[in-house]
Image (spheres, rainbow, N blue to C red):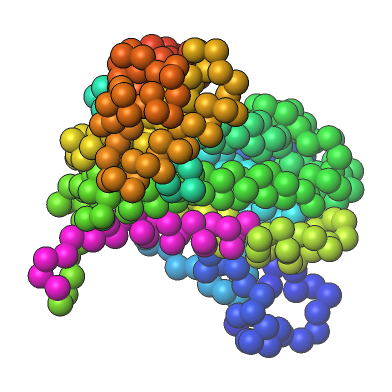
Amino acid sequence: MAKKLWGGRFSKKTASLMDEFNASIEFDRKLYKHDILGSMAHAKMLAKQGILSEEDRDKIVTCLGEILKEIEAGEIEFSIEFEDIHMNIESILTDRIGDAGKRLHTARSRNDQVAVDIRMYLKDEIKDILELIDRLQNVVVDVADANKETVMPGYTHLQRAQPVTLAYYMMAYYQMFKRDASRFEDCYKRTDCLPLGCGALAGTTYNTDRQFLADELGFASLCENAMDAVSDRDFALEFLSNCSILMMHLSRFCEEMVVWSSAEFSFAEMDDAYSTGSSIMPQKKNPDIAELIRGKTGRTYGNMITLFTIMKSLTLAYNKDMQEDKPPVFDSAETVKACLEIFTDMLRTMTFKKENMEAAAKKGFTNATDAADYLVSKGLPFRECHEIIGKIVFECLNRGIAIEDLSLTELREFSPKFEEDIYEKIDIRSCIAAKKSYGSTSFESVDTMLKNAKEELKK
Ligand code: ARG
């Protein structure tokens, strides 16, 4: 069995069960690239400060470069005896270049090393996620653009409420994804703070240059307190929270697409390429992608709760509990990226059944509020108008007709204020066009939303 890098004060070997339980290499191997880049920067800094010779620095940097290539080519086998990615790489390095490798860990601890690795990893992931959100927002805008005239019922309590356009509906989701992007950008700022050079918890006695490390690794600022730097996982919690909120948005969207694809609604149909069949029922076409995204939302909530629970009682500074931060962070990053990617394709290829949407908007008394507003315009108080239209709806329900199917004489039995212009006022498109408040579903307002969105997306 290989000698532990920290074996000096021990007289016994670790139990093999202990090695297995303690190791994180099975999952933190994912950080190999960031770990190597961090170590290269550290070696350069040590040499610049005269702590390491230039010769040793060159040996370290060259050898780390070779190890990186070999890992990428799948030529390196890691071992649980060396616990984690940091010590696996250090031991391979030392096997190859001897004393120079042993000098690399001067003025550094695994505590600041792992902290910088996760931050670098998350910065990359956040950039990828932001790009995927941008792609999705573009598709949402395309669908909206193509459906500015598509009328559908808007719902509350999943009961038909007021007529809106599909474009307006899409632009509501656009706003949600815009907030998601802004949350990830915000989280990026706090992730972009360098913990490397903080040592185990108290800083180091060497004359290091942390600003050099930040410049070398592309960090915007330095963590100010070494103890906080090595024990902080707030940025990962923010990341996991942002993933959860984003997934909740995708899940709501998916739920709607599942409902809309049902025969009962029949508002939309998914493309064959993004649907599945049944092993027993030949007629079935199932919206599996939407259901899976809805389901995967659960695991991102779980990941968030996992890390919150890991962190909640930890004394300062580092505790080994924190090694458990990585599986949930990796899993949420992978899940969110996969869901964003496939959801975007699913939405892009969906067909919307415009006639069915419009027919539904015409059926559910979605113009009842506008009928009440009509009476308000004739001088009646709103509460009274509400009561009158309520009675009309009750009558129509009994007769199985819509408000506009009543003759003027019949309408006047409910209120003498009704005149011929009522029919134009409660036409479904007029109801939409008549909305005046900022941010409404009116055609004009949605045009503005689309214009703003296109400008935002250009940036
Ligand atoms: N594998 C460890 C982790 O992921 C690295 C840090 C270990 N630090 C320590 N003091 N044992 O958290």
Closer-to-camera residue (145/105): 145
Residue 411 in which image quadrant: top left
**Residue at the spot 48% in from the left edge and 42% down from the top edge:** 156
- Please say if 16 is above or below 179: below
Q: Is residue 284 above or below residue 448?
A: below
The residue positioned farthest toward the left in the image shown: 282
Q: In front: 258, or 53? A: 258
- The C terminus sits in image quarter: top left
Q: Range of the magenta residues? A: 281-304
Q: Is residue 211 above or below residue 91?
A: above
- Residue 32 belongs to magenta span: no
Name the spot of residue 51 as percent of width and height, x first. 77, 39
Q: Nearer the viewer, residue 46 or 162?
A: 162
**Residue shown at 30%/36% (left/top)?**
402
Please give left or right for residue 205 compared with residue 353 in the image: right
Residue 370: horizontal and vertical position, in percent? 43, 24
Q: Is 20 displayed left or right of 103 in the figure? A: left
- The kind of secondary structure the magenta stretch mainly shows is helix
Q: Residue at x 23, y 61 (%)?
A: 286
The quadrant of the rendering that contains the N terminus is: bottom right
The image position of residue 189, as x and y in percent, is: 66, 31
**Tag count in the figure?**
0
Q: Is residue 229 visible?
A: yes
Residue 270, given in percent of the width and then of the height, sits at 21, 48
Q: Is residue 124 left or right of residue 168?
A: right
Q: Is residue 102 left or right of residue 389?
A: right
- Residue 447 in view of the camera: no
Q: Tell me which residue sits at (75%, 74%) in the image.
A: 7
